[in-house]
Image: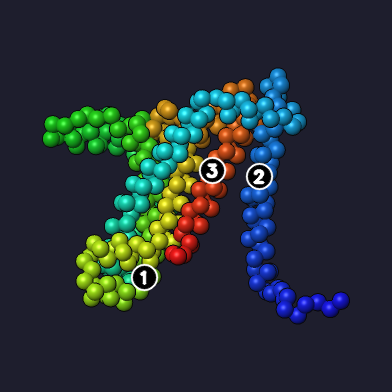
């Protein structure tokens, strides 16, 4: 039977896609499958024994502290996403519409510079600033305020999340806003739209994809972060990433830690797919 002439394979494009597919398979799919498989193992006499038992899933999902950590982690990541997106939008708007293209390139370059240093080092710097006798409370003492508890608090955790995600979200939003057709904005002004109304009725809908993608990146990074809630939040209450560490230290319970990890990955995949679907959904 002759092959259907309408079915053609672009071997050139397939060749360039192959390295990415191999990378995703080796460093995402395989580790994920191993985590799922590990979650069914058993621990006997502080040693992991291969098997297939759902006892780890049943016990972890039956623990109240697991769900407390889950809801706390989800809530903190959601809060960080909202705060970061709201703070990033004015910055991205100014970079996109108030600066020249050359100045915008330099601004994006300076936003990338923080990623040249270790995230852990930046968090240690925040410890010095947020400590009870730190720089911020010392500055507040000059005007007779404070000292305030800034370290080992939820506020400290959010500040750490902002340190991790804010430059990236600003860059993503800037790239999205800069691609908007200026003629559409001028048309809105000619039709009587004020500046604020133009932002919400024209600019935000046109930049919806970039805004949502930036928020998704912020949520993913915050949801899985370990450094900020541990060093700036005091790990009380613990997030899921801290719970993984505590679980492995408790009798070498790596299978139960795998349950937590798989739950985190499943949550992030659901959030990512839902957000991307909303980003590319067209209006009826």
Tell me residue 273's x, y (percent): 53, 53
Q: Position of residue 236 (x, y in %)?
A: 42, 27
Residue 180 numbered mark, or none = 1
Give the Cα separation between the discs numbered 1 and 2.
Answer: 40 Å
Question: What number is the disc on residue 31?
Answer: 2
Numbered label attached to residue 267: 3
Asked whether 36 or 132 is in front, the reply is 36
Residue drawn at (23%, 33%), measured in percent from left and top? 137
What x and y, as percent, mark residue 55?
Answer: 67, 26
Bin the neighbour count of mark 1 within 10 Å (Cα to Cα): few under 14, some 14-19, many 20 and up. Answer: some
Mark 2 Cα within 10 Å, few/some/many (few <14, many 20+)? few
Q: Which residue appears farthest toward the front when viewing the image?
A: 284
Residue 202 vertical position relative to residue 156 in the rendered view, above or below: below
- In the rendered image, the residue lying farthest to the left is 143
Colouring mode (rainbow / by chain / secondary structure / one colour):
rainbow
Q: Which image quarter: residue 228? A: top left
């Amino acid at each position: 039977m002759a092959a259907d002439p309408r079915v053609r394979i672009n071997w050139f494009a397939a060749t360039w896609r192959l390295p990415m597919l191999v990378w995703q398979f080796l460093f995402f799919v395989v580790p994920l499958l191993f985590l799922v498989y590990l979650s069914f193992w058993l621990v006997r006499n502080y040693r992991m024994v291969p098997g297939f038992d759902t006892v780890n899933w049943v016990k972890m999902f039956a623990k109240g502290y697991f769900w407390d950590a889950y809801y706390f982690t989800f809530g903190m990541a959601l809060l960080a996403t909202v705060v970061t997106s709201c703070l990033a939008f004015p910055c991205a708007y100014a970079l996109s519409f108030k600066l020249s293209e050359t100045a915008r390139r330099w601004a994006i370059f300076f936003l990338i510079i923080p990623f040249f240093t270790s995230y852990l080092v930046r968090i240690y710097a925040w410890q010095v600033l947020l400590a009870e006798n730190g720089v911020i409370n010392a500055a507040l003492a000059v005007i007779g305020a404070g000292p305030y508890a800034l370290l080992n608090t939820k506020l400290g955790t959010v500040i750490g999340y902002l340190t991790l995600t804010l430059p990236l979200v600003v860059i993503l939003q800037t790239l999205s806003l800069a691609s908007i057709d200026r003629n559409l904005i001028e048309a809105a002004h000619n039709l009587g739209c004020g500046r604020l109304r133009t932002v919400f009725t024209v600019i935000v809908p046109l930049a919806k994809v970039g805004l949502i993608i930036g928020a998704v990146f912020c949520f993913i990074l915050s949801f899985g972060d370990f450094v900020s809630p541990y060093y700036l939040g005091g790990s009380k209450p613990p997030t899921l990433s801290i719970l993984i560490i505590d679980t492995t230290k408790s009798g070498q319970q790596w299978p139960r830690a795998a349950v937590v990890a798989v739950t985190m990955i499943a949550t992030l995949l659901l959030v990512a797919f839902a957000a991307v679907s909303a980003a590319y959904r067209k209006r009826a």
